[in-house]
Image (cartoon, rainbow, N blue to C red):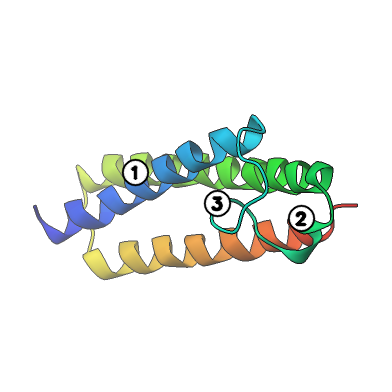
Amino acid sequence: MSGEAAALSTYFVTGTVYILVSVPLLLDKIGPNWFYGFRIGRAYKSTEMWYKVNRIGAKVFVGYGVIMLAIGTIAWVVSLSVPLTFEPLLIDNLLLVFVSLVHALVVCNRVN
């Protein structure tokens, strides 16, 4: 696998994982715990708050998952005619992961 293909695959893998991890949270299948979900102080105030915080955080993650899949698809189509390099693709994906985590935490901390 070339470096370009490896970097492009990170978008597909990351986007898919974001969506798959979010589905049980959206469906309220994961109760309060210390391992899985958006584990912020506010989420532990009550069971109802846990589910509310995690539904909202999961919606943010699904959105970013879709964005990652779209970017991966667009970059793959572009790569068919223009060679892409590994480092910018990987750095962009890592930056998007960081932004998504910060965004989800900010949104989850605003839940009332």
Along the line of sight, which residue is nearer the eye, 102 or 29?
29
Residue topped by disc 2: 43
Q: Say which quarter of the image contains residue 87.
A: bottom left
User: Could you tell me the amino acid type at mark 3?
Assistant: Tyr
| Residue located farthest toward the left when viewing the structure as drawn | 1
Q: Upstream in the sequence, badge 2 or badge 1?
A: 1
| Residue 31, x across and y down, in percent | 66, 42
| Residue 80, x across and y down, in percent | 20, 42
Along the line of sight, which residue is nearer the eye, 78 or 96?
96
Q: Is residue 77 left or right of residue 56?
A: left
Label 3 Cα neighbours within 10 Å, binned few <14 / some 14-19 / many ≥20 = few
Along the line of sight, which residue is nearer the eye, 54 or 17?
54
Q: Say which quarter of the image contains residue 89.
A: bottom left
Distance (Cα) linking label 2 and label 3? 12 Å
* Above or below 1: residue 63: above
Residue topped by disc 1: 12
